[in-house]
Amino acid sequence: MNNKINLDPLLTHIGLCVIQSQSVEFLLRGIVMSFRKQINNKFISELKPSDIYESTKSGEKLRKLTLGTLKNLIKDAEILNPDRLEKYVVERNYIVHSFWENEIATDISNESVQQSLIRCQNFIDESEKLESSLKGAVYILAKIMKEIDSKLNIDSFEKFASFEKDFDKY
């Protein structure tokens, strides 16, 4: 009888958790950029929209902001539900920094793997909902920016427009 526990599905789910959280982080960075004048932070308020993509010193610093820092910047600007975002960041940090040691390494069993899969799937589901909402928000912001600034690259707007269906869900 083979009692070996298959960790492949769990490892895949953990990887998906990390990738999903990076996508949410990227979208939050875009929202921070959109509201940079309303955020009480000297560095953020002086950024240019192009800094999010360019290899400038400011752009590199912006891309290094952690999910927790982005959450705090957005919280201060009262843009999104701070409780939902706080719970998300706490769960993301647990999965990335403590999950393996606390949930798997100390008690590896079929039951612990199944419970961990459920926890990861719940995080993935929340990530997808949050990501869809953020894509919708970024789409609306891009539409407003296009109306205000005719210099906005149309390709960027068309990319944002592809998320319109997601905005309608939430």
Image (spheres, helix red, strand yellow):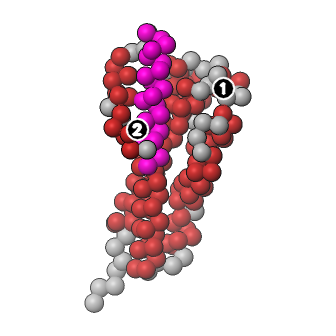
Amino acid marked by disc 2: Phe
What span is in magenta?
A: 129-150
Q: Residue at x 39, y 66 (%)?
A: 10
Quarter occupied by residue 78? top right
Q: Position of residue 70 (x, y in %)?
A: 60, 38
Looking at the picture, does residue 55 appear above or below residue 21?
A: above
Q: Where is residue 165 in the image (x, y as percent from the top left)?
A: 33, 38
- Residue 93 relative to residue 120: left or right: right
- Residue 46 relative to residue 53: left or right: right
Q: Which residue is drawn at 65% across and 19% down?
A: 46
- Residue 162 visible here: yes
Query: Between marks 2 and 1, how big is the CA–CA gap?
Result: 23 Å
Q: Residue at x 34, y 80 (%)?
A: 4
Q: Residue farthest to the left?
A: 1
Circle 1 residue: 38
Circle 2 residue: 167
